[in-house]
C-alpha cells in the first residue's frame, strides 16, 4: 500500500502513523519528498483496515501496489536507484562497463587483464573464484586463493571487484575480499542465498535464471531488498529457448520492460547471452540502444588458454574495438561512457 500524506504533515505525525503500520505486522517505509511525504506498508494489506486510514486527517490518498514485487517496483519508488561500485554509480548517467575473465586462474592472468581493462576506464573487474560448472569435471575455480587474487587486483588497479557467490555460508568470508556479489543464473532462485546477500550491504549483481520469467527475476530481487539490502543490480544474461544457434537467447525485451517496471539498474551480459565472441559487440550496442544501464563482458588476454568460457572471451584488441564501437550508441541513448 502507498499512503500519500497531505502537504505540510510533520515527520513526527508521519512516524506515529508508521509505528501503527508496524504494530500491525507490516513493513513500514518512510519516503519524504520535496512537496509530499509518501509512506509504504508492505505485507498483508487487509490488516490495515482496522487503522481506518481513509478517515485519518493527515492522509491524502491511499493506493494499492498492484505488482507482486513491491519494494523494487516503480509504483512504490519512481526514482532510479543508483548502486555504488566504488565511486561509480550504476544506474546513473554513465554507462557501466564491467569486464574481466570468466574465472580467476592465476595472478598473471588476473592482473594482466585487469591492467588492460583498467586503461579503458571500466567501472569494475569481474572474475569468478567459485565457478558453478555444468560438469563436475570442469574447472571449479580457485576458491579462497581466487578471492585473494581479486583483492590484489583491486589494490593494484583501484578497480572494484565482482565475483559470484554460490553458497550462503561463503558470504561473510567473501565480503572481506570483494566489492560486489554476483548471483549467477543457476542460483537465481536460491532463496536462502538471496536472503544471505540481502542481510549485508555490499552491492549484489543478480543474474536472471536461464528459465526465469521477468517476474521471477523481480521477485528474486525483492528477496534481497526485503532482507535489508537495497543495492541490487539486475542482469539479463540470456534465456533458454528452442534456438540452438547461440548459447542462449539474449532477451532485450526484458531490458526495456524492466526499465519501465523497476527502479533498479539493469545490465546486459552479451557474453553468456550469445556465447559467440563475434556477437558480443553488436549485442552490447543493442543493449545500450534499448536503455540498459551497462554491460558485463568476459575478457581474457589469451582466450585460447582460458580455463572456462574462452570461446566467448574478448582479447585486448577485441575489447578495445568494443569500447570504440559502443561509444556512439551510448551517446545516442543519452548516457556517458
Ligand atoms: C559467469 O558470469 O561466468 C556465469 C557463470 O554466468 P551465468 O550465471 O549468467 O551463467
Ligand atoms: Mn562465464
Image (spheres, rainbow, N blue to C red):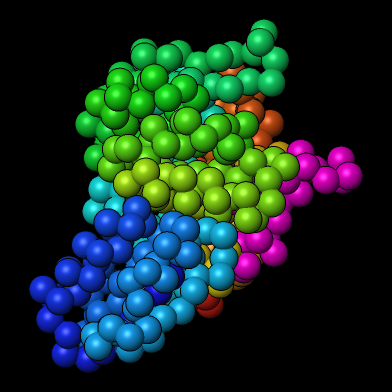
Q: Is residue 258 above or below residue 145?
A: below
Viewer-side residue, 80 vs 139: 80
Q: In the picture provided, is 311 more to the left or to the right than 3?
A: right
Q: Quarter holding the N terminus?
A: bottom left
Q: For residue 243: magenta? A: yes
Viewer-side residue, 50 vs 105: 50
Q: In the picture provided, is 96 more to the left or to the right than 155?
A: right
Q: Residue 244's image quarter?
A: top right
Kindly report the secondary structure that dominates the magenta region of the rendered protein: loop
Which residue: 52% across, 58% down?
69
**Residue 237: x and y, percent?**
63, 46
Stretch of the chain drawn in magenta:
235-257
Q: Residue 317's image quarter?
A: top right
Q: Is residue 193 above or below residue 33?
A: above
Q: In the picture provided, is 246 more to the left or to the right than 271?
A: right
Which residue: 33% across, 57% down?
24
Q: Quarter holding the C terminus?
A: bottom left
Viewer-side residue, 123 vs 230: 230
Q: In the picture provided, is 292 more to the left or to the right than 240?
A: left
Viewer-side residue, 274 vs 205: 205
> Which residue reaches farthest front?
50
Q: Is residue 252 above or below residue 145?
A: below
**Residue 124: x and y, percent?**
37, 44
Q: Is residue 8 visible?
A: yes
Amino acid at each position: 500500500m502507498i499512503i500519500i500524506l497531505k502537504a505540510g504533515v510533520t515527520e513526527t505525525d508521519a512516524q506515529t502513523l508508521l509505528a501503527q503500520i508496524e504494530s500491525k505486522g507490516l513493513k513500514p517505509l518512510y519516503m519524504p519528498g520535496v512537496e509530499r511525504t509518501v509512506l509504504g506498508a508492505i505485507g498483508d494489506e487487509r490488516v490495515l483496515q482496522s487503522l481506518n486510514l481513509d478517515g485519518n486527517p493527515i492522509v491524502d490518498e491511499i493506493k494499492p501496489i498492484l505488482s507482486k514485487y513491491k519494494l523494487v517496483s516503480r509504483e512504490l519508488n519512481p526514482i532510479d536507484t543508483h548502486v555504488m561500485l566504488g565511486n561509480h554509480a550504476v544506474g546513473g548517467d554513465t554507462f557501466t562497463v564491467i569486464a574481466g575473465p570468466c574465472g580467476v586462474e592465476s595472478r598473471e592472468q588476473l592482473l594482466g587483464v585487469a591492467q588492460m581493462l583498467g586503461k579503458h576506464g571500466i567501472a569494475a573487474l569481474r572474475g569468478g573464484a567459485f565457478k558453478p560448472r555444468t560438469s563436475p569435471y570442469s574447472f571449479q575455480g580457485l576458491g579462497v586463493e581466487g578471492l585473494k587474487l581479486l583483492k590484489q587486483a583491486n589494490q593494484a588497479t583501484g578497480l572494484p571487484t565482482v565475483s559470484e557467490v554460490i553458497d550462503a555460508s561463503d558470504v561473510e568470508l567473501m565480503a572481506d575480499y570483494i566489492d560486489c556479489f554476483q548471483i549467477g543464473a543457476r542460483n537465481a532462485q536460491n532463496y536462502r542465498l538471496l536472503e544471505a546477500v540481502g542481510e549485508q550491504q555490499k552491492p549484489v549483481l543478480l543474474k536472471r535464471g536461464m528459465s526465469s520469467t521477468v517476474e521471477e527475476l523481480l521477485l528474486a530481487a525483492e528477496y534481497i531488498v526485503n532482507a535489508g539490502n537495497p543495492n541490487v543490480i539486475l542482469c539479463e544474461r540470456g534465456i533458454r529457448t528452442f534456438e540452438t544457434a547461440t548459447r542462449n537467447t539474449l532477451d532485450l525485451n526484458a531490458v526495456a520492460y524492466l526499465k519501465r517496471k523497476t527502479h533498479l539498474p539493469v545490465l546486459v551480459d552479451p557474453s553468456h547471452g550469445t556465447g559467440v565472441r563475434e556477437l558480443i559487440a553488436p549485442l552490447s550496442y543493442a543493449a545500450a540502444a534499448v536503455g540498459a544501464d551497462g554491460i558485463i563482458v568476459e575478457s581474457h588476454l589469451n582466450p585460447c588458454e582460458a580455463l572456462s568460457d574462452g570461446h566467448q572471451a574478448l582479447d585486448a584488441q577485441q575489447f578495445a574495438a568494443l569500447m570504440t564501437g559502443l561509444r556512439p550508441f551510448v551517446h545516442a541513448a543519452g548516457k556517458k561512457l
